[in-house]
Image (cartoon, grey):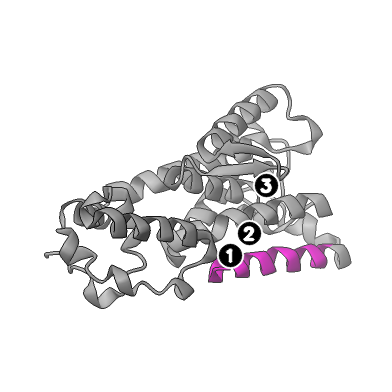
Amino acid sequence: MTRWVQRLLIANVGMYFVQQTMPGVTDSLMFVPVLALARPWSIITYMFLHGSITHILFNMIGLFFFGPRVEQRLGASRFLWLYFLSGISGALLHLWLAPHSPIIGASAAIYGVVLAFARFWPTDKIYIWGVLPLEARWLVGITVVMAIYSGLNGSTGGVADFAHLGGYVGAYLYLRWLEETKGSKRFRELAVTAPPDRQLSNWKRVNMQSVHELNRDEVNRILDKISASGLGSLTPQEKQFLSNFVPPDDRVTPAS
């Protein structure tokens, strides 16, 4: 498990137990749209509150399964930005479209993490209830349609549908911003244009023990592809992905 996913899990679970022993904490830290200006901290604190054991269980399962791979792909700081911006944008969209309904829960932030996962690995299969296989991109598409339909029809069952949608919106805008920044462009150009024998010449020394278990299958697949067909057979996306695990002293330094 990656560092910040672990810390977020601990923080959420810890706050849930605090809620059980100090009920007034929930009222003080929940996001109440009409009180947003008077309680600005609540746009952050509401993400760490949950209404039931099933509420926190499903959110933490999502963070546990999707978070580590996304954090390892983005890096710790960008992962945190993604998480909190998704949660904040969820609260803001809820404020706009459902201003009279208080909300709690990490769902908007988790939805942002799920969208990032689907953006990086769109065809990876997610097994719903451990049985039904569904590609990550379709999971996002279906949940968007469900949230819009439910939100327009009153959001029954206490589900903050507009906050979920806001989480997707915030994550999408942040990821697009990363793609358009100079540093990200330079990184993409390096993955596309650097000669394979310079960029990934040290691929045989990839330490699989340091690769998170969620990434090992993909790393092994790419290494097998190199062994069979050479570095030139890799796609730009595969080069970019593998470069995260090649010993750093042999990576190409981008030109200034």
Q: CA distance from mark 3 to mark 2?
A: 32 Å
Q: Amino acid at mark 3?
A: Leu
Q: CA distance from mark 2 to mark 1?
A: 7 Å
Q: The residue tagged with tag 2: helix, strand or loop?
A: helix
Residue at (51% x, 44% y) in the render: 124
Q: Find residue 40 and report its image quarter.
A: bottom right
Residue 186 visible at all: no
Residue at (69% x, 38% y) in the render: 160
3 horizontally vs 120: left or right: right
Label disc, if present, on residue 153 of the rendered structure: none
Verify CB contact (< 8 Å) between mark 3 and mark 1: no
Reading the image, the residue beneath label 2 is 64
| Residue density around tag 1, few if under 14, some if 14–19, many if 20 or more, within 10 Å | many
| Residue density around tag 2, few if under 14, some if 14–19, many if 20 or more, within 10 Å | some
Q: Amino acid at mark 2?
A: Phe
Q: Amino acid at mark 1?
A: Val
Nearer mark to the viewer, of 2 and 1: 2
Residue furthest out toward the left: 255
Q: CA distance from mark 3 to mark 1?
A: 30 Å
Verify CB contact (< 8 Å) between mark 2 and mark 1: yes
Reading the image, the residue beneath label 1 is 5
Nearer mark to the viewer, of 3 and 2: 2
70 horizontally vs 48: left or right: left
Q: What secondary structure predominates along the stretch shown in magenta?
A: helix
Indicate which disc, 2 or 1, sits on the residue closer to the N terminus: 1
Q: What's the magenta region?
A: 1-19
168 horizontally vs 238: left or right: right
| Residue 205 percent location from the top left of the image | 32, 75
Q: The residue tagged with tag 3: helix, strand or loop?
A: helix
Residue at (46% x, 41% y) in the render: 122
